[in-house]
């Protein structure tokens, strides 16, 4: 059908243009320029939210011809002849905002005596069809095969923005000028679109033709809220999943992207009201649109990229509106990962990154302007490659300095070499990292004093594992383990030296840079603080790590305390008498109870129903920011000493957590595909039994297996393939339990004879892994 549409469209347009050429032998340079597609701007030019008259010589003439023919032939005119308008919309010149703005301004500059009054605002037609009546029409049409009534409804409804409002607006003449209510009968819109894809082709073509007419309509004055409602309805059309409609979709996206900021504000809040399914479908259509434009399966079906370079920027800006709507919703409508476009994993992201670095958020488009589209794996690659380039520059400078001084060149200059003694692991590591601070962005190599062996990755991972276990042990006192939230938090005790907190931050930065997944758990607010700000300020007096945190953040950290504060906020009784609180709080520090005022004179200020919100906010800020400021500031500077990069501006707090700790989502089937074997083959009976058992394990047991083998129950950003998971054979009695080498992500299995025996031994080993079976 698409090929037939394209052929008819091409012939009709060629015939129409031939007629025009006969009437107009030459076309002025100005008219030819108007026919071109101008590049879309990052910031809409002044007046883009307003419309005025714009001429489209070839297409409008064709539409006029078609409409005249329809009027002359009456209601029996077939929609088949309207088909060319649908397929050949790619030849349409874009609506030029600059031209419209110039025309609108020129009217205001005319003298009063020659000014013509603007026509009054058109009246929205009254349509009385209900959802029930529409559904009955659909059912009758499907039963009888007579689609005339349905056809007329779609033909009329999508003919113009006014008709769209007439059909779907709850009350035709009500303003509905609020961000919370679009005034659209969402149930009716859903019913109409759900039925559309099951209607005959003529009806679907009529809808597309009507959308074209609506988008090409001559605008006078600013966009109204009824126009926004029409855009809101049109962008939900499910027909845009087909590449045959992409040119129409692109023009719609361009007009939405070019609206004024205030109009975008309304659309963002209206998008929040969509159901999760509709919202996700719209996001997926936009992502598919971008992917197909980048890598079309059939390039001949789309215009050349040079003629439609504005397609992807327009789609990205509309996606940004949806992302804003998702971020404003509590909880989010869909996961932030649903905005990832994994097609972009295969482009030269560093070229895009350098474009962004050079031009910022100017008129030069780059995907880095819209980081929510980029997956965590892509962002990690950007951070690593950006750091590598910095490392290469530093190493090159070190070599140049050595050569210029005629000193012997030592290749160890290319690495961050850490030498530590096991008994003094923390102190030696701190000394080494402090002394070699300028080398932190070099490739890490670890040596344990008195032990032979080269670091091929195993010693580095072992160093991380041992150091993290020792620092985070409760006896060490740096961090407190919160049982309710199963995470660690910074101890609030005061001291003269916070260098060990800087060490932990440096370790986290080194882990990200060296692709090591750490077995540590911080609450989500920790990563918000780590990006506050994402770039280290030049002024040392500027506070760092002071994020704007709420009761929800406290609930993820100290849930019992958060519930108590929540009860305070909702309490209906006498707050002063029943709670007896002041703006002073107490907390234990090294066995001593200390009191702190949340505001000046807080010990004398009673908490009342009127000021309890302020009390809760100040208390949350004290617990998560002020009480641990020096500890976290050292931690912040340690992390950024390794990962200092503008690429951090691309990251969400959740993505920083994934880079440090890995993803909690396990895919054991993917692990099976990526597994390597030593002494076994994948067809050996023991291996087949192993995977049968593992794939049948519940999620908790699968996590225990991963922790037993790798030292962490999480997956690296690159997925299971990045684990280098290995199953090795050990020739010992089958009475032995499996053994793991976490430094090499290796599990060693005796040649068990049965699935039952393997499951029993493996379950015992991974269920008692702490301090047993790990090497």
Image: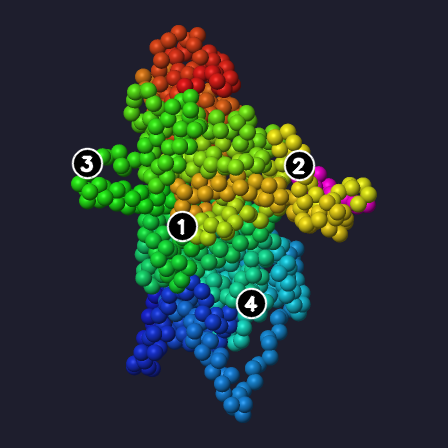
**Mark 3 or mark 4, whichever is nearer to me:** 3
Q: Residue furthest left?
A: 406
On residue 227, the disc is: 4
Q: Which residues are magenta?
A: 561-575
Q: Residue at x 31, y 45 (%)?
A: 389
In primary-sequence order, the first of circles 4 and 1 is 4
In-front residue for pair 27/141: 27
Q: Which residue is mark 1?
A: 646
Distance Cα–Cα, label 4 vs label 2: 60 Å
Q: Is residue 565 magenta?
A: yes
Q: Answer with the quarter of the image where residue 566 lies.
A: top right
Distance Cα–Cα, label 4 vs label 1: 39 Å
In primary-sequence order, the first of circles 2 and 3 is 3
Residue 22 percent coordinates (x, y)? 31, 80
In-front residue for pair 300/151: 300
In primary-sequence order, the first of circles 1 and 2 is 2
Q: Which residue is mark 2?
A: 594
> Is residue 331 something that shows in the picture?
no
**Mark 4 or mark 1, whichever is nearer to me:** 1
């Amino acid at each position: 059908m698409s090929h037939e549409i394209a052929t008819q469209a091409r012939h009709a347009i060629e015939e129409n243009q031939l007629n025009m050429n006969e009437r107009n032998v030459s076309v002025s340079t100005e008219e030819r320029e108007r026919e071109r597609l101008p590049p879309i701007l990052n910031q809409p030019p002044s007046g883009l939210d307003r419309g005025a008259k714009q001429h489209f010589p070839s297409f409008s003439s064709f539409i006029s011809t078609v409409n005249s023919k329809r009027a002359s032939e009456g209601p029996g005119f077939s929609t088949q002849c309207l088909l060319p308008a649908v397929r050949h919309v790619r030849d349409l010149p874009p609506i030029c905002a600059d031209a419209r703005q110039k025309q609108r301004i020129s009217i205001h500059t005319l003298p009063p005596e020659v000014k013509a009054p603007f026509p009054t605002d058109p009246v929205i037609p009254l349509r009385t069809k209900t959802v029930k009546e529409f559904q009955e029409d659909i059912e009758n049409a499907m039963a009888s095969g007579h689609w005339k009534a349905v056809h007329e409804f779609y033909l009329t409804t999508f003919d113009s923005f006014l008709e769209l409002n007439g059909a779907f607006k709850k009350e035709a003449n009500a303003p509905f000028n609020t961000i919370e209510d679009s005034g659209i009968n969402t149930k009716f819109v859903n019913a109409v679109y759900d039925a559309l894809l099951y209607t005959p082709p003529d009806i679907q073509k009529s809808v597309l033709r009507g959308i074209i007419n609506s988008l090409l309509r001559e605008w006078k004055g600013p966009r109204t809220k009824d126009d926004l409602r029409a855009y809101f309805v049109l962008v939900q059309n499910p027909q845009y999943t087909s590449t045959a409609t992409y040119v129409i979709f692109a023009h719609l996206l361009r007009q939405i992207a070019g609206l004024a900021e205030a109009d975008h504000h309304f659309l963002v809040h209206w998008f929040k009201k969509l159901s999760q399914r509709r919202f996700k479908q719209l996001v997926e259509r936009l992502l598919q649109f971008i992917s197909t434009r980048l890598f079309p399966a059939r390039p001949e079906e789309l215009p050349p990229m040079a003629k439609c370079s504005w397609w992807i920027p327009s789609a990205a800006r509309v996606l940004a509106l949806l992302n804003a709507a998702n971020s404003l919703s509590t909880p989010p409508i869909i996961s932030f990962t649903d905005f990832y476009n994994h097609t972009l994993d295969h482009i030269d992201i560093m070229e895009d990154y350098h474009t962004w670095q050079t031009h910022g958020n100017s008129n030069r488009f780059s995907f880095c302007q819209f980081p929510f589209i980029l997956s965590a794996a892509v962002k990690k690659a950007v951070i690593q490659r950006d750091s590598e380039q910095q490392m290469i520059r530093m190493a090159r400078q070190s070599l140049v300095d050595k050569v210029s001084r005629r000193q012997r060149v030592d290749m160890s200059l290319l690495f961050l070499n850490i030498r530590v003694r096991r008994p003094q692991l923390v102190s030696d590591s701190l000394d080494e990292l402090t002394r070699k601070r300028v080398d932190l962005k070099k490739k890490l190599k670890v040596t344990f004093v008195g032990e032979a062996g080269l670091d091929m990755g195993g010693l580095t991972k072992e160093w991380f594992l041992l150091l993290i276990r020792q620092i985070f042990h409760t006896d060490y006192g740096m961090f407190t383990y919160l049982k309710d939230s199963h995470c660690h938090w910074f101890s609030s005790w005061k001291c003269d030296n916070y260098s060990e907190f800087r060490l932990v931050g440096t370790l986290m930065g080194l882990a990200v840079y060296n692709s090591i997944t750490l077995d540590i758990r911080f609450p989500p607010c920790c990563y918000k603080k780590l990006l506050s700000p994402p770039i280290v300020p030049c002024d040392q007096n500027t506070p760092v790590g002071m994020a704007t945190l709420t009761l929800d953040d406290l609930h993820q950290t100290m849930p019992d305390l958060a519930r108590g504060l929540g009860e305070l906020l909702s309490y209906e009784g006498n707050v002063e008498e029943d709670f007896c609180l002041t703006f002073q709080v107490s907390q234990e520090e090294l066995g001593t109870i200390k009191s702190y005022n949340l505001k000046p004179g807080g010990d004398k200020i009673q908490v009342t129903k009127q000021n309890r919100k302020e009390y809760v906010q100040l208390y949350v800020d004290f617990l998560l920011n002020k009480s641990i400021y020096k500890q976290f500031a050292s931690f912040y500077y340690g992390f950024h000493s390794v990962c200092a990069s503008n690429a951090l501006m691309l990251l969400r707090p959740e993505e920083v957590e994934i880079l440090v700790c890995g993803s909690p989502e396990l895919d054991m089937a993917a692990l099976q595909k990526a597994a390597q074997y030593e002494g076994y083959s994948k067809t050996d009976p023991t291996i087949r039994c192993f995977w049968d058992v593992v794939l049948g394990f519940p999620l908790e047991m699968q996590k225990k297996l991963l922790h037993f083998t790798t030292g962490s129950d999480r997956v690296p950003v690159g997925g299971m393939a990045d684990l280098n998971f290995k199953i090795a054979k050990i020739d010992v009695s089958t009475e032995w339990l499996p053994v793991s080498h976490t430094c090499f992500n290796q599990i060693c299995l005796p040649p068990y004879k049965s699935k039952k025996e393997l499951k029993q031994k493996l379950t015992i080993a991974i269920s008692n892994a702490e301090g047993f079976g790990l090497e």
